[in-house]
Image (cartoon, rainbow, N blue to C red):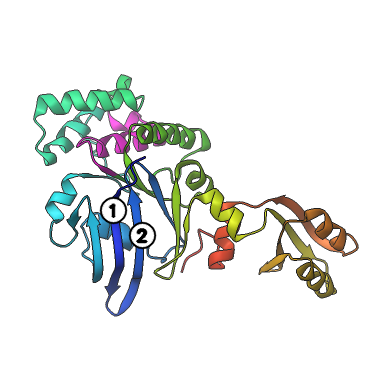
Amino acid sequence: MDTTALVEGRGLVKAFNGLTAVDQIDFSVMRGECYGFLGPNGAGKTSTIRMIQCVSPPTGGKLIVDGRQAGKDDRKIKEIIGVVPQEDNLDEELTVIDNLRIYAGYFGIPRRKAVKRGMELLDFFQLADRAKARLRSLSGGMRRRLIIARAMLNDPALLILDEPTTGLDPQARHLIWQRIRKLKGRGVTMILTTHYMEEATQLCDRIAIMDKGKILLEGPPGELVASEIQGDVIEFRPDGKGAEQAVLKLEKQGALIEKAGDTFMIYTKYPEMALNTLATEEHHFLLHRKATLEDLFLKATGRKLKEGG
């Protein structure tokens, strides 16, 4: 992976009618890496992505993409970006290959070259046998792969993946992850937004967790989980009163404790000691497991990823 930045945001701001959606954030996306923006709805992810795509100009700060400044060199920036949108906006009246061929025209790619490039991408995304098929014959997973193939027509320096696997079954999702990892192996730089914690863990070299327009945490997913919360989690839902003393004892043992609704989330390096402390407490629910990115997200924002806000 190249250590130079392809995308840099410094003091980046986006405001709408007095509402600050992105509030002076700093970030860098290195060449060849997959960088993920995570956050609940309303966190500022989409506004950030739209500024990088040059479809919504920054209100303040500076945004540089491949050495060009957003807001000044938008046309040049758009030429080197491929975008996979959340929505399915394929043309239902066209065949699979014609969806690619016509879209290639927006980049000025000649017809013969567009068809050749399109077939190469269909082969890469395991859709070559569907080239002349109508879209109605494609499954949801096939359609998403076609949308990613379309985003690669201009051989972009930066691929933006906005919720690329939302609504897909696990098998289709894993197939797309496999193709995305292959693209990454070819050196394609990617920015990913997702609601799936496993997706971020599987694909992202680094993530930025956003909430209320700010970046709360940034770094490799595994390192963030290890550094920000303890290695094990105990979910504990007490039966009635009397849990306060046990919670205080756990805190004295060095555990970090958060409350999510009626459930205590106990983060600890010493799960056996914590479980012994809770052994005499009556409870509705008790679960011991390893800490995950979802736990880190909940601790950082106080909200689950799919919650609004």
Q: Do the residues labelled 1 and 2 touch (CB within 8 Å)?
A: yes
Residue at numbered disc 2 = 27
Asked whether residue 249 is drawn in magenta, I would say no
Q: Residue furthest bottom?
A: 18
Query: In what element is the residue under mark 2?
Result: strand
- Residue type at mark 1? Val
Q: Residue at x 35, y 64 (%)?
A: 26
Residue 192, position as x, y percentages in the image: 38, 49
Report how far apart the C-alphas of labels 1 and 2 lie in the structure: 8 Å
Q: Report the span colored magenta.
A: 134-158
Whether residue 163 is visible here, answered yes or no, is no
Residue 190, position as x, y percentages in the image: 34, 44
Query: In what element is the residue under mark 1?
Result: strand
Asked whether residue 135 is drawn in magenta, I would say yes
Q: In which quarter of the image is residue 9?
A: bottom left
Query: Which secondary structure type mostly characterizes the magenta part of the structure?
Result: helix
Residue at numbered disc 1 = 7
Residue 118, position as x, y percentages in the image: 22, 27
Vertical side of 58 occupied by 78: above or below: above
- Residue type at mark 2? Phe
Using the image as rendered, state which of residue 166 and residue 228 is in the foreground: 228
Q: Residue at x 34, y 51 (%)?
A: 29
